[in-house]
Image: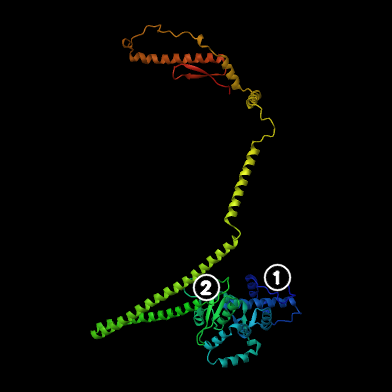
Amino acid sequence: MKRKDISVMSSYERMDDDEFARICSDDQKMNVMYSSLRDKSVNPQSWQQKMNFWQEAITRHCHQYGLVIIEQASLAKQLTRNGRTPQCLDAVIAEMKRSGKLKPLSAVESEGAAVGWLYWGYSKFIRNPLSWAVGLASSMIVKNNKSQEECMMEVLKKKADHLLDSHLERVRTHHEQDLIDYDHLMELYADLCKDKRELPLLISHLVKQKKALIVPQSSSNQKPLIKFTQNKNVSVSPVKYTDLKIYQIQCVEKRLEKQVHTLTEDIKRLTEEAKGHVQTKSRHLALHTLRRKKNHELILDKKLATLDILHELVFKIKNVSSDQQVLEAYECGVAAMKELTKDINLEKTENVIDELHDTFNEHEEVNQLLANTTLTGDANVDMKELEKELDELMKEDKPNTEEDDLAATFAGLGIKDNEFPQVPAESPCPRLNESTISISPSLQEETMPLLDDEEEEEEEEVKEKAEEIHPKVAFSPQNGNTGKSTAVAVPAS
């Protein structure tokens, strides 16, 4: 276990689950924990460890079983282990009371003096009529510290928050209204408050936190009303006149709903009775039963119509309330706008806009002036001469490549048009009439290989001559247009 500051008695901190489980699983340590608590001056560290363990054990036990009100004798029995009860509960409970974790039940009730009538109502409507005898017995038991009832404040706060969250959820889903009577609240949260004395404590805590409000009824015989806040992050709002009227209408609705349920059951029963009379051939009884059933149906229709009217009335009242809130919000908005714009008028706005446009125009003129201004003073220099000089420098700096040399070589081999012989106007050979010449197919087959060989030899000769003229001239096959081979100059690889 980690060492803690033992100089202050209230240095208790919640244990984590692993640490608490490790201590509980060690029988040797548990024997020490269940023994009597020695004087703190003998071994302060052991005293503080035992005190921390039992505070943690009691807190976990109360959270696990939802115990708000505890009593030392019953707590000792509930914490029994292997037939042993803790021998140091007196000192532990005294320390928890000193630190505020536990408070006497009587002290918690007296703190709710502002809602003392609630406890009076609790005593009047919940306790046994012979409560004076129970109070007498309780006053005798309180004299014994071991039987005094204490209130676990941490569990009380947790249950009060759960009560508020549950009620807000019911209101949000339209299962409950803002105002709710005490008995109905007790009926709804009977599982949460297994001890009937807990509910007044929870309500008292919420009242002190300004999350709930207790509304007494005009008649002393009527149960009090409880109003909860509509948002757990804000305080509860005061009870309005409309809240009470809506509650009265809703009470009438509940009574009508019960009557509607009863009438519906009666109609079903009368229908079955009429069927029975028909089976027994009792015509007059069947007619009488059907007449009663018809009357019940007429009454049921009227009550259902009344329920619809009441539902619509409540809906309109709530809408009027929300409309009033919207109107108040509009008024607040208008007032705020007037306050913010009281120093602004149309003339002043126009002047500001004009000044803004003038400033923009002046700024644009300054930018154009700066962009067109030269700082070197040579604006009269001819740019064409500068570009021509730049081209000459670029030509001088550009190195000659093999392609440039080859292009220069071929440029020196130019042939003028007048060096070619004149094209004859007529063929030197007489034109033969193709129709008079006939070549047999066999002769054509024999001569074709010879012509091909001659063409190949001619191509080889042209290639050799071209290579003699310039070694970089590559030979290409026959031209597709002329049918003759041609030489093409290509750069050396």
Percent coordinates x, y for residue 121 in the rendering = 54, 86
Side of 98 where 190 appears, left or right: left
Q: Does label 2 or label 1 sit earlier along the sequence?
A: 1
Badge 1 amino acid: Lys
Q: Quadrant of residue 14?
A: bottom right
**Closer to us: 287 or 241:** 241
Side of 14 where 475 appears, left or right: left
> Relative to residue 434, is residue 246 depicted above or below?
below
Q: Which element is circle 1 on?
A: loop
Image quadrant occupied by the C terminus: top right
Name the disc covering residue 168, or none: 2
Q: Quadrant of residue 212?
A: bottom right
The structure residue drawn at horizontal position 45% and vertical position 15%, both measured from the top left corner, is 455
Taking the view exactly as shown, the residue that stands out farthest to the front is 347
Q: Quadrant of residue 162?
A: bottom right
Whether pointer 2 and pointer 1 mark residues with C-beta atoms closer than 8 Å, the reply is: no
The structure residue drawn at horizontal position 37% and vertical position 76%, both measured from the top left corner, is 305
The structure residue drawn at horizontal position 44% and vertical position 13%, both measured from the top left corner, is 454
C-alpha gap between disc 2 and disc 1: 42 Å
Q: Residues within 10 Å of mark 1 (few under 14, many from 20)?
A: few
Percent coordinates x, y for residue 262 in the rendering = 38, 82
The colour style of the image is: rainbow
Percent coordinates x, y for residue 288 in the rendering = 27, 85
**Closer to us: 31 or 152:** 152
Percent coordinates x, y for residue 74 in the rendering = 60, 84
The structure residue drawn at horizontal position 46% and vertical position 16%, both measured from the top left corner, is 484
Q: Which element is circle 2 on?
A: helix
For residue 268, say whether it is visible: no
Which of label 2 and label 1 is nearer to you?
Answer: 2
Badge 2 amino acid: Leu
Name the disc covering residue 2, or none: 1
Side of 404 where 32 appears, left or right: right
